[in-house]
Image (cartoon, rainbow, N blue to C red):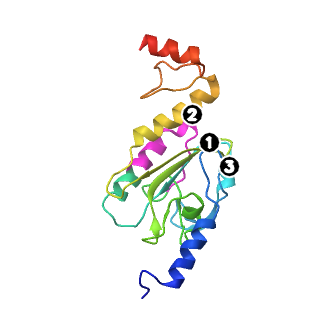
Amino acid sequence: MCEKECPAKKAYEDFLRIVPKVQVGEEAPEIKAQCLCPCGAIKDFDMSEYKGKFIVLLFYPLDWTFVCPTEMMGYSKLAEEMKDVQFEHGGVGKLSFPLVSDIKKCISMRYNMYNAADGIARLGYVIVDTKGIVRYMQVNDNGIGRNTDETKRIIEAIKFSDEHGDVCPLNWKPGKDTMKPTPEGVAAYLTKH
């Protein structure tokens, strides 16, 4: 068992620092891994097959924790709800999306969701747009569940902003005011609100 000053642990942590990690606004790293498919069989997953669709990558630390099962069911319902807005879905038993394996931790490392101290993924998610660009990243403490309504709102805001050129201010929801991304646009919005 390694102690805190273990050379192998230090070398591994040094390695993690040089692994390229994606940031918001950058192209999403390719994902090729095994996944559990709708029929319960294991198959190869290739994220490039989902190009042209919004992708929500959910990272969770461990199976059988208290928060993660509630989230998997909630995101499954959200995937069903958003079929018409190109939210990607597949199916895993009662889940409506593919469950991709990250046994080597390569995916969580590339998406900056790896917790090296515990050797597990962080509780987080990434939204990739239809062009394959990372548009949103969030990481939560393991005791705080994610919010499917917020995920849906973020996707809708990305789509609206891309389509109309306006920006979506604090607490924006579809049908609410947006603003032009100019000093005059901000002034007009703030005057009205």
Whether label 2 touches label 1, CB < 8 Å: yes
Q: Amino acid at mark 1?
A: Asp
Q: Position of residue 39 (x, y in %)?
A: 52, 62
Looking at marks 2 and 1 on the same chain, the residue that comes earlier in the sequence is marked by 1
Q: Main secondary structure of the magenta part?
A: helix
Residue positioned most to the front:
5
Query: In terms of image quadrants, where is residue 15?
Result: bottom right
Q: Is residue 86 above or below residue 63?
A: above
Counting labels gives 3
Find disc 1 in the rendering and name its residue. Answer: 129
Q: Position of residue 131 (x, y in %)?
A: 68, 42
Whether label 3 touches label 2, CB < 8 Å: no
Determine crowd level at label 1: few under 14, some 14-19, many 20+ residues with C-alpha closer than 10 A.
many
Q: Is residue 105 magenta?
A: no
Determine crowd level at label 3: few under 14, some 14-19, many 20+ residues with C-alpha closer than 10 A.
some
- Label 1: which secondary element: loop
Q: Is residue 84 above or below residue 27?
A: above
Q: Is residue 78 left or right of residue 32?
A: left
Q: Amino acid at mark 3?
A: Glu
In the rendered image, which quarter contains the N terminus? Answer: bottom left
Taking depth in this image into account, of 42 and 46 the one nearest to the observer is 46
The answer, for residue 81, to whether it is visible in the render is no
Query: In terms of image quadrants, where is residue 62?
Result: bottom left
Q: Where does the magenta region start and end?
A: 74-91
Q: Is residue 77 magenta?
A: yes
Disc 3 versus disc 2: distance between alpha carbons? Answer: 16 Å
Looking at marks 3 and 2 on the same chain, the residue that comes earlier in the sequence is marked by 3
Can you tell which mark lies on residue 27?
Answer: 3
